[in-house]
Image (tube, rainbow, N blue to C red):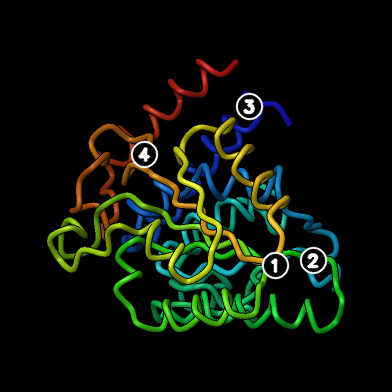
Amino acid sequence: MDNLELKRHANEVRRGVLIGTHAAKAGHPGGSLSAADIFTYLYFEEMNVDPANPKDPKRDRFVLSKGHTAPGLYAALAEKGFFPKEELTTLRKLGSHLQGHPSLKCTSGVDMSTGSLGQGISAAAGMAMAGKLDNADYRVYTLLGDGELEEGQVWEASMFAGAKKLDNLVVIVDNNGLQIDGPVSEVNDPNPIDKKFEAFNFHVINVDAHDFDALRAAFKEARETKGMPTAIIAHSLKGKGISFMEGQVGWHGKAPNDEEFATAMAELDKIEEGLK
């Protein structure tokens, strides 16, 4: 898939994030938008997944360790065809299969229930280990927030993954620099992130999270890395794509009101026009 088509899909994923959070009057748009290009690349280029056969044992697995950015995952799954886009308006509604955090029992395409920060990478490492024991060819991908790296369980899982040489595991860090309480560098600085993963026996790649050529090269390098897991440190912009949300910590967990929604959707319309 060429970059222009990927950009179109990413714009639709961002649109889905806004539609879901606006309808719910709740949710986490900031980190969903910063990861929208990552979600897009994974589901439209990198991963072997099929909406018509979501439980295929040969499929690649994805675990959203930063589960609060479910609006971004749901938007990507809908764009891929796992369920109708119209259902995004049911986000967080009673009885909806699109709850505030991903549930593998509720939502087609979700491989692991997540929400408690730090736990997703542990599940992903377990899946990767299972793949090794079964001599399976599938790969496992997990997306973490940079604030999530403050959880000790992240490093327990990383120690395990490095020790077991899980080269079928790719850990992606959405490094947007902001968490709910402010800049990660001020709350509990996890930097240098790359050096920490290297210390846990990971192959580490730093990449621009919004550059599809860079993402393509990074995931290719991860596939070619043998004998150790890969950590892709994806340097991103919180709220990417919506001017008044970009780089603003206040949009970590706040839904747009009607006026903000209209303004944001108009901005995405302009981006769409430029991609024709």
Nearest to N terminus: mark 3 or mark 4: 3
Pinpoint residue 95: horizontal percent, then vertical percent: 53, 78
**Kind of residue indicated by mark 2:** Tyr
What residue is rendered at 52% in x and 58% in y? 231
Q: Which mark is residue 3?
A: 3
Q: Are marks 1 and 4 in contact (CB under 8 Å)?
A: no
Q: CA distance from mark 4 to mark 2?
A: 31 Å
Residue with the mark numbered 4: 240
Of badges 4 and 2, the one in the foreground is 2
Is residue 195 or residue 271 the one in the foreground? 195
Q: Position of residue 44 (x, y in %)?
A: 70, 44
Q: Which mark is residue 138?
A: 2
**Crowd rating for badge 4 (residues with CA inside 10 Å; few <14, some 14–19, many 20+):** many
**Pointer 1 local density, CA inside 10 Å: few below 14, some 14–19, many at least 20:** many
Residue 270 visible (yes or no)? yes
**Residue neighbourhood size for the residue with mark 3, other residues' Cα within 10 Å, grouped as few (<14), some (14–19), many (≥20):** few
Q: Which element is circle 4 on?
A: loop
Separation of disc 1 and disc 4 at Cα? Answer: 25 Å
The Cα atoms of the two marked residues, 3 and 4, are separated by 17 Å
Q: CA distance from mark 1 to mark 2?
A: 7 Å
Task: From the viewer's perspective, tell me whether residue 27 is left or right of residue 200.
Answer: left
Please identify the quadrant where the N terminus is shown: top right
Q: Is residue 211 above or below residue 223?
A: above
Q: Quarter holding the C terminus?
A: top right
Up the image or down, 187 lies above or below 94; here it is: above
Check whether the beta carbons of the residues at disc 1 and disc 2 lie within 8 A of each other: yes
Q: Is residue 22 visible?
A: no
Image disc number at residue 117: none
Label ID, residue 61: 1
Whole-number angstrom distance, CA of label 1 to CA of label 3: 23 Å
**Coordinates of residue 227 in the picture (x, y in percent):** 69, 66
